[in-house]
Amino acid sequence: MGMRVLAAMSGGVDSAVAAARIAEAGHDVTGVHLALSANPQSHRTGARGCCTVEDSRDARRAADVIGIPFYIWDMAERFQRDVVEDFVAEYAAGRTPNPCLRCNEKIKFAAVLDRALALGFDAVATGHHAQLVDGVLSRSVDAGKDQSYVLGVLTREQLSHAIFPLGGSTKAEVRAEAARRGLTVADKPDSHDICFIADGDTRGFLAKRLGSAEGPIVDEGGEVVGSHHGAHGFTVGQRKGLRIDRPAPDGRPRYVLSIEPVSNTVTVGPRSALEVTSISCERPVWNGPEADGELTVQLRAHGEVYGCRFEERDGGLVIDLDRPATGVAAGQAAVLYSGATVIGSATIASAA
Amino acid sequence: MLPEAIEAMTEQLGRVGNASSLHAAGREVRRVVEESRETIADALGARPSEVVFTSGGTEADNLAIKGLYWARRPRQRLLISSVEHHAALDPAQWLADSQAAQVELLPVDEHGRVHPDTLRAAVERDPDDVAMISVMWANNEVGTVQPVHVLAAIARDHGIPFHTDAVQAVGQLPVSFAESGADALTLTGHKIGGPMGVGALLLARGLTPVSVQHGGGQERDVRSGTLDAPAIAGLAAAVRTAVKEQAEQQRRLTALRDDLIERVRRAVPDVVLNGDPDDRLPGNAHFSFPGCEGDALLMLLDARGVECSTGSACSAGVAQPSHVLLAMGADAAAARGSLRFTLGHTSTKTDVDRLIEVLPAAVERARRAGLS
């Protein structure tokens, strides 16, 4: 007898194929679309966003085609609190959050998983591109679509109730399979921006919530080189949109080096000043096998991978990179890998 | 659908001809439409000319509410109960938002009933400015039957058109348009074992709402669109059968429902029955299950072969706290923890047995999952 599996269905192609695969494998599957916005828009525009009315319809149609029961769960309040407000608060504190990761950690594999287990399900399946075999998380075979990074924050307990049926396939294979299965979402565009910022204007979204307050842009020496309308509009490593009139003395582009929310100060400097090799992290989560052999670390979604060593210190983690990284922002996750396998993760606090 | 309705409808499906055409085929179809009109009028205490066919309840409600509001301008007040179906509430809201209507939602008591005193006081604040009044015959969620005759009489005293959405009442309760005192009454096919996509507005003679959709003026010049003769024939057959069997159906369903309520109370002692305990639709049992999320309970029961409903869903399908329960004074948590069990002409004691068999475990499990 198979397991009772709740398939989280976003209305996209990945989660539809994931649900179809586990149903075909003989599990008792129920499709659930998570309504994450209290006031959903009726249509998607391009690749942006999710949880529109159209998406919930697409998810329902996919469930019809697969032949599984389908329901909508209202997770809007939890999402607002644990993801959207957290996102705003993190920016306000000068950090750069990853809301997709937070959604996995707090919604899909917490609020939804808890509810599913209480209602008698054994596991939650999603369409994430990552492999999970015997509770061990590793990268998708499709390097370009790999999402193990945004799942790397999950605990062993959370992973023990997760199913990711797509990790062994490329995105192209998933699309072809969707078409073969008669799932009409086969050619739906990928979503890749922040789902709750429908127009893609993160800075505008933050300005509306955090207000605008003029503050200085200073160089490394503390000299004021420009001004801005709110430090929360910046992220470490950012180059565009600084609007500094005066060129740097060496004429080279300047980047955001750090953000200081209390004094509302943004510090800029040359690219070389962005380079860091030592990263301090907090709240480590060990969810994989013992660290073994050559380790690598990924510092943001779809970011580069660096060879590294780490040391546990004061309940946190210090990661030393084998070559300099740039644009390392506090608030992002550092996910540690041994080969393709996730060992654990921690939240970046600072870098030098 | 009732076998009578299927038969009447399928008999017409092979026929050609437009009821508005003058040739022989057209006349044949026209005859079917007019006989259907007479059947419906006869069953519901109306005159044939008072039957205006529509595409269903929503269109009939829109025509009554918007059409009568427009016809009665410059009067601006529109009085409507706070527990109406969205098909009535939303046209009123639209009139308020974009047509300068002053919509006043009539409050209800804890059972969801509009008190005659409430309506009278509201009307008398400025009777000359009231364009129309709309109060449903019986509530689709909690089943409460409104004192429609008394309310209509109050409207009549002031010469104000009174509309009632009787979608839930026809076939369940005795409904006579003439005796009700209403000026307009909505009914729809699929609630009485007829086809979907067809309904009617019973409209008193001499009352001419402004059209919502314009065109050939087929129905008394207030409703345009080629008549769907097969569906109309199906609707008429369903109305005839449902009204003929109404008394027996009411007796049978009331007994079945009272048994269901009694046994649900025994199985889940802290359950709360919503709606009027006595004056309610015979097939309706609506409960709040403290500590449960209605949609979780629905899913668990559905998986065990018991089909029921939460209040209503928004367009995305998200269960919303019911405006009906909120209007009755329930808090949002109680409103979200509510389920409606509806019994109809196919329901039997076996269905109730099945519910009682699976309900306690489902409630316990839903409670463990808690409120999200």
Image (tube, coloured by chain):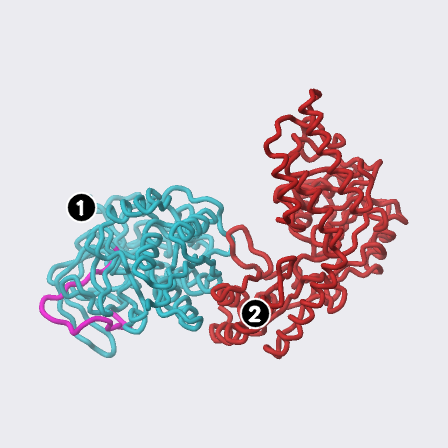
Chain colours: A cyan, B red
Can residue A266 be seen at all in this image of the molecule?
no
Residue at the extreme right of the image, as rendered: B157
Residue A6's place in the image compared with B80, above or below, is: below
Tell me the quarter of the picture where residue A116 sits: bottom left
**Residue A183 colored in magenta in the image:** no
Residue at the extreme top of the image, as rendered: B23
- The magenta stretch spans which residues? A281-301
Provide the residue designation for mark 1: A250
> What whole-number distance in Å separates the C-alpha atoms at marks 1 and 2?
79 Å
Same chain, labels 1 and 2: no
Image point (65%, 68%), residue name: B330
In this rendering, position of residue A128 left or right of residue B305: left
Q: Quadrant of the N terminus of chain A?
A: bottom left
Q: Amino acid at mark 1?
A: Asp
Q: Nearer the viewer, residue B363 or A152?
A: B363
In this rendering, position of residue A9 left or right of residue A303: right
Provide the residue designation for mark 2: B355
Q: Position of residue B220 (x, y in %)?
A: 76, 31
Judging from the image, mark 2 belongs to the subunit labelled B
In this rendering, position of residue B114 left or right of residue A148: right
Judging from the image, mark 1 belongs to the subunit labelled A
Image point (70%, 58%), residue name: B139
Residue at the extreme left of the image, as rendered: A293
Q: Amino acid at mark 2?
A: Leu
Q: Quadrant of the C terminus of chain A?
A: bottom left
